Amino acid sequence: MSVKIREDRFRHVVGDNAIVEQVATGFIFTEGAMWKAKTGELIFSDMPGDIVRKWSEADGITTYRQPSDKQNGHYFDLEGRLLSCSHSASNVSREERDGSISILASHYNGRELNSPNDIIVKSDGTIYFSDPTYGRMEGFGLLRDQDLDFQGVYRIDPETGELSLLVDDFDQPNGLTFSIDEKLLYINDTDKGHIRVFDVANDGSISGGEVWAVPEGPGEGGCDGMKTDSEDNVYCAGPGGIHVYAPDATSLGVIQIPEVTANFTWGDDDLKTLYITASTSLYRTRVNVPGPSIS
């Protein structure tokens, strides 16, 4: 069995078993998986290798961007342009149609961001991203002192490009995802090992922040990448693999992965293949409930 079923609803969301296939291996540390539906390609990072890679069924593994400023999380904006979080350059960037790179955020109140890590886009185009300090470590980024004295989560206004700090009371904010109706924003804290939930106001600000769930169980790994499927179930990388939660915060079960899991996304034509970035490898498995369409 490649699953740990904790509640029967898991069978509807994932299935009775998840056959985990290793698609490719030999990387240093994989992250930031995003499915590009128009081309049938998976984009993902190999941070310590300073490279963004691409995989397709037809071509296998190819290079998408090298060097990459040790980019981590990726997402597509409303126009299908790739947004990326850079660990070593401490910025959020956007790849334009002509292939050029625009920097969307690099400083807050005149001080350099820590190391933008994960990123999502609201349906109105607003960009949200987490900013822990992992990219100021050797290997996963560039060893250097921290300019800011906190680790926060930010939003970038889609009209003005203004950067706003939303919350600054995290130890290490990491994965983040909206509920389907975008009224809730889930953000996990890797050091504290829990997922918090915030109410999202019409102006994009957030409030609340109580602990929503605590991914627990055997196996290595901590709270990391997080996404919501098309039925509002929340998936979160955690100990032993990917933890699946119902919208009411019930822990439904865990998709068990052979390596420490960092991130994942749904892909293929039906968005029912879960592509998983886990340490040295890329894995995939099939699930019953599809992910949302992003690109």
Image: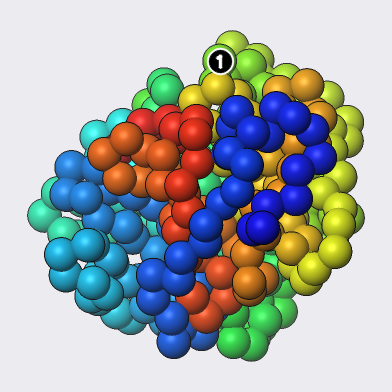
| Residue 167 x, y percent position in the rendering | 75, 39
Residue located at (39% from left, 70% from top): 23
Q: Is residue 75 above or below residue 31?
A: above
How many labels were placed on the picture? 1
Quadrant where the N terminus sits is bottom right
| Residue 78 x, y percent position in the rendering | 31, 31
| Residue 195 x, y percent position in the rendering | 79, 42
> Is 23 placed left or right of 170 in the picture?
left
Quadrant where the C terminus sits is top left
Residue 155 seen from this side: no
Residue type (three-letter) at the residue carrying disc 1: Asp
Q: Is residue 43 above or below residue 287?
A: below
Q: Nearer the viewer, residue 267 or 252?
A: 252
> Is 84 placed left or right of 255 in the picture?
left
Residue located at (56% from left, 51% from top): 18
**Residue 201 lies in what quarter of the image?**
top right
Q: Nearer the viewer, residue 169 or 288?
A: 288
Q: Nearer the viewer, residue 100 or 5?
A: 5
Label 1: few (<14), some (14–19) or many (≥20) C-alpha neighbours in 10 Å: few
| Circle 1 SS class | loop
* Residue highlighted by disc 1: 181
